[in-house]
Amino acid sequence: MAKRRANGEGTITKRTDGRYQAAAYVYRPDGTRVRKFVYGKTRAEVAQKLTEMQEKTRQGIPAATSAMPFGDYLAYWLATVAAARLKPSTFMSYEVMARLYIAPSLGRKKLNRLSPADVRRFLAEFRDGCLCCLRGLDANRAEDERKCCAKGRCCHRHPSARTVQYVHAVLRSALQQAMREELIARNVARIVETPTVVRQEVRPLDRTEVRMLLKAARSHRLYALWLLLVSTGLRRGEVLALTWDDIDLGRGQLRVRRNLQRIKKELVFGTPKTARSQRTVSLPRRCAAALREHQSAQRAERAAAGLKWDPLPHQPSGLVFTTPTGRPTDPRSLNRMLTVLCRNAKVRRVRVHDLRHTCASLLLAQGVDARTIMETLGHSTITMTLDTYAHVMDTTLRAAAERMEDALGPEGGGEGEEAAQPPG
């Protein structure tokens, strides 16, 4: 006779349709306990599922149910799945989208009752709504900033097409995990078309503006940083995470191995954006010379600081671009510095990321091929490079067509024309 399972160990029974089922009490995301069922074709399969479910319960990990409110599942997915898989900066943006926009609108819907129409309606309302009202359920915002339309003074600030697309991506990812856990039969967010995003035309600095900007930056203590951004197209976080070990001044090369980001109130070092982003970049001679000057200036700065030189415990040793006290440079401070430099140089105001676009545009203007630019910038695909800089490549393509015209020779074929004439 089989030994009776103790109370709380779960039960396994055979159903009338021939399948096996098991049941056990598990934690829900809100901390309460509920009885959950799992099914399988064999007793061994069901026993394995039961063991996995009970192990989660022993660890205090909540188990989702198909009839739970979607807001509860969203919280469960963020805490147990997204937090483990995503980089900190990406997770933070997912959490903001879920808390401010998705949960207030769809959170009360049952997970297994969510329909394509619900998602389509949500995206339409989100696209057309004002940001203050869309964030109306966020308790962290001041009362006078909430539901401005209800008070008759709409802020007229609507989500960008990219933000609508990003919210849809978060929703789609959460429901895809619910499908993997067999809580729902289909991902209704995948059925709804992704909102289109009209790509904004890149407006990089031209050659004259770049020279004016670098001339104004020559006396700046981070001149080498601005020169690197324009010359190599490094991302803001990549250049701020460089260490002297990453730079080979003799060979004129640097390696991109990490980045620096602000996650809420903390500066966090992590891996670059994609695998392609970990790359080796060749340096123009003037960049190498500027870095040598910066290295000497940093040594003098450190000696002058003395005991005030106080790096953060978790930062890599030998950071290239630090504050006067040896700490990492906050990525946000570069934006303010660049605004001042643009004003001093009397050029139009641009973002730090626009210097990356400027680098690509200058390379294209010099006839550098798209593949080399892709490797320099660390794009994941050449399609991204071609799509982003298609408008800048017009002059390069025109020059290529003219070179082909020269290669073909005069119209009519020249010597070949004479040979093709019939005998008199």
Image: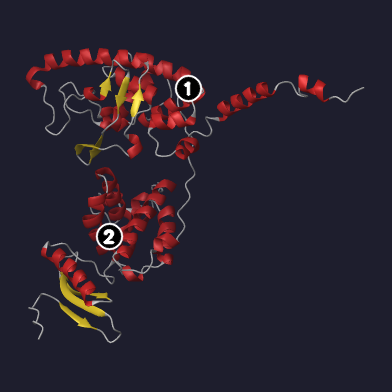
Residue 52 x %, y % = 18, 66
Which of 74 and 424 lies nearest the eye of the viewer? 424
Residue type at mark 2: give it.
Answer: Leu
Residue 359 x %, y % = 42, 25
Does the image show residue 357? yes
Residue for badge 1: 206
The residue positioned farthest toward the front in the image shown: 423
Q: Is residue 181 left or right of residue 421?
A: left
Q: Residue at x 43, y 21 (%)?
A: 347
Which of 398 and 136 lies nearest the eye of the viewer? 398
The N terminus - image quarter = bottom left
Q: Residue at x 25, y 15 (%)?
A: 294
Splitting the image into 4 quarters, where does residue 343 fall? top left
Q: How many marks?
A: 2
Q: Determine which of the numbered discs, if any, sits on residue 74 in the image.
A: 2
Are the residues at dot 2 and dot 1 in contact (C-beta closer than 8 Å)?
no
| 194 relative to 15, above or below | above
Q: Residue at x 46, y 24 (%)?
A: 363
